[in-house]
Structure formats: C-alpha cells, structure tokens
C-alpha cells in the first residue's frame, strides 16, 4: 500500500456520555488536494473489515485522498457504552459531525476542492450517510451509498426472540433476525449486547428516506444478487424527485456480502468523487 497510514483513537464528548469512538486518520503520500473521505461501515462489521481488509483505504490513498474511518459504537475498536442514547442514529450523526471537524473537514466553499467532505457508506453505513448528508448540506459534497435500502432491515429485527435465544437457546423463527444475530456473533470483537442496544435505538428512530433527502449528488451501488438492488430504483426516485442528481451502479455477480470487495465498486466510487 502506498501512502502513510495512521490510526489513532480520538475520544469525543457530544451531548452526554463519551462514546469513545475509534477514529482512524489515513494520509496519502501524494495529496490530490481534494476534500477528505469519510467511510461508514455496516452492522456487525468494522472499519478494518469493511474498508481496510477489502482494499478501500489503499485505493483511496493511491488516488490521493485523505481518509477518515470510524468504528461505530459496540463495533471494532470502539467502546460499548451502557446508555442507549449513544447508539441512536441521531447521536451517531452528531458524533460523526464532531469527529469530521476534528479531522479537519471544513464547510463547503465555492471554488475550493479541498473544502467539505465526501462520504461512502455500506449497508447500515448507507443509512447513516443518507441521513448525515440530509442534515449536513453545508459540509457533505457527495455521497456513495453501497447496499442501500428504502427501509432499514434492522427495524424488523426481533429483539425479544434474540434475547431469548441468547439466554436459553430458544430457536429464532424469523430468518432475518436469526441471520443478523449469527452474523453479529461471528466476530469476537463485537459486543453482542451493545449491538442489540444499537438495534433497539434504531427501532426508536425509524428510517424514512423520503422524510429528509440529501441534495448533493449521490451514487447508489448494489450487487446484482443483493435483494436490495431491487429497491434501489425506488430510492433513486425519492432522491430524484427532490432534485438530487443520482447515478446507479449494479455489480454483476455480487451479493450484499461480497459487493464491498468489488474493484468496479472502488473504481466507480473514486471516479464519482473525483
């Protein structure tokens, strides 16, 4: 990998209990003079798994982009706060704003390509990126949303069934809930109870993309075999109706699980953000 790659922990206090988010700052060897790129990973993943191990950080550094990564609460190297508020999407967005400013992102200025912030999100990260773009139009320049959806699958997660299963092994009948819980348990770095707190907090703040639409250009990306690809045109229509410029990219032969490793995804995103 070319470029200097650094990762350091920053602790932010935003509206209450410190969430102790782990933030990585990655500097390119040859800076292109463009705004930084914020990467938001998916549920039960981490910045290392979602972005570093898949080559995203390397590709962005090679393109001369400064990269900011974060592990969401309860994920990767971030802490697992006990208070439910730390996991709410609105609280996470507030923390993202604070850490972006701390990382050197500045409000958009006409004629200054180094101002503002580009955001790439995957799965849950796409939901957070959509809402972050909608609430921070003075900061966010462009969005790339991978594996997006018109609804949040975590909102349908059966918390009671999951808790019973963890307590005494009671089988989970809902396939989606069982799959998400199994996925969350596969990674030793995950705090399963923190992830359930995240689900509970997400349920308390339903996702409605039509309620607040980002107005900056966006690229929607999904694997051909990802069931979310079917709803992507609907999400694009919501954005277009609000006057947002939208592009769509389908990745042949890719699913929701492996789309993030696609070279075409990386190349498409980097070109879109250039």
Image (tube, helix red, strand yellow):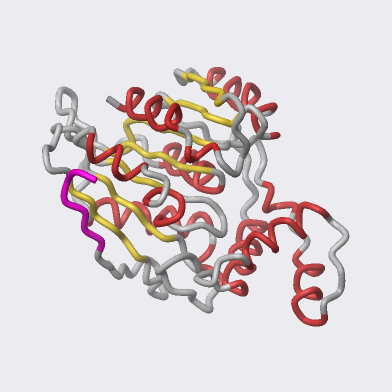
Can you say whether 193 is above or below 49 in the image?
A: below
- Give the overall secondary structure of the magenta segment: loop
**Residue 5, magenta (yes or no):** yes
**Residue 76, magenta (yes or no):** no
Left or right: where 36 falls relative to 271: left
Left or right: where 19 falls relative to 164: left
Q: 22 or 179: nearer the eye?
A: 179
Q: 155 or 32: nearer the eye?
A: 32
Q: Residue at x 37, y 27 (%)?
A: 267
Q: Residue at x 20, y 42 (%)?
A: 106
- Magenta span: 1-7
Can you say whether 265 is above or below 88 in the image?
A: above
Q: How many marks?
A: 0
Q: 104 or 268: nearer the eye?
A: 268
Q: Residue furthest bottom?
A: 168
The x and y percentages for residue 15 are: 39, 67
Can you say whether 242 is above or below 200 in the image?
A: above
The x and y percentages for residue 273 are: 32, 27
Can you say whether 100 is above or below 200 in the image?
A: above
Q: 178 or 255: nearer the eye?
A: 255
User: Residue 79 falls in which quadrant of the image?
Assistant: bottom left
Left or right: where 218 falls relative to 160: left
Q: Residue at x 30, y 37 (%)?
A: 59
């Amino acid at each position: 990998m070319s470029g200097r790659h650094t990762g350091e922990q920053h602790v932010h206090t935003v509206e209450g209990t410190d969430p102790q988010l782990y933030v990585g700052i990655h500097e390119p060897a040859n800076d292109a003079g463009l705004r930084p790129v914020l990467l938001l990973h998916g549920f039960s993943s981490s910045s290392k798994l979602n972005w570093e191990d898949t080559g995203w950080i390397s590709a962005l550094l090679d393109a001369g982009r400064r990269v900011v990564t974060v592990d969401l609460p309860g994920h990767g190297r971030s802490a697992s706060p006990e208070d439910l508020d730390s996991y709410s999407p609105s609280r996470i967005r507030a923390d993202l704003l604070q850490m972006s400013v701390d990382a050197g992102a500045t409000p958009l200025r006409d004629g200054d390509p180094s101002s503002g912030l580009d955001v790439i999100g995957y799965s849950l990260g796409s939901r957070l990126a959509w809402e972050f773009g909608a609430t921070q139009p003075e900061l966010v320049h462009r969005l790339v949303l991978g594996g997006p959806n018109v609804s949040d699958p975590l909102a349908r997660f059966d918390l009671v069934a999951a808790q019973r299963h963890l307590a005494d092994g009671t089988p989970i009948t809902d396939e989606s809930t069982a799959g998400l819980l199994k996925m969350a348990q596969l990674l030793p770095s995950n705090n399963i109870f923190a992830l359930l707190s995240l689900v509970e907090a997400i349920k308390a703040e339903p996702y409605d993309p039509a309620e607040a639409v980002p107005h900056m250009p966006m690229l929607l990306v999904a694997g051909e075999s990802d069931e979310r690809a079917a709803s992507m045109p609907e999400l694009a229509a919501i954005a277009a109706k609000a006057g947002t410029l939208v592009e769509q990219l389908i990745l042949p032969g890719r699913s929701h699980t492996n789309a993030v490793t696609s070279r075409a995804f990386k190349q498409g995103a980097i070109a879109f953000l250039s």
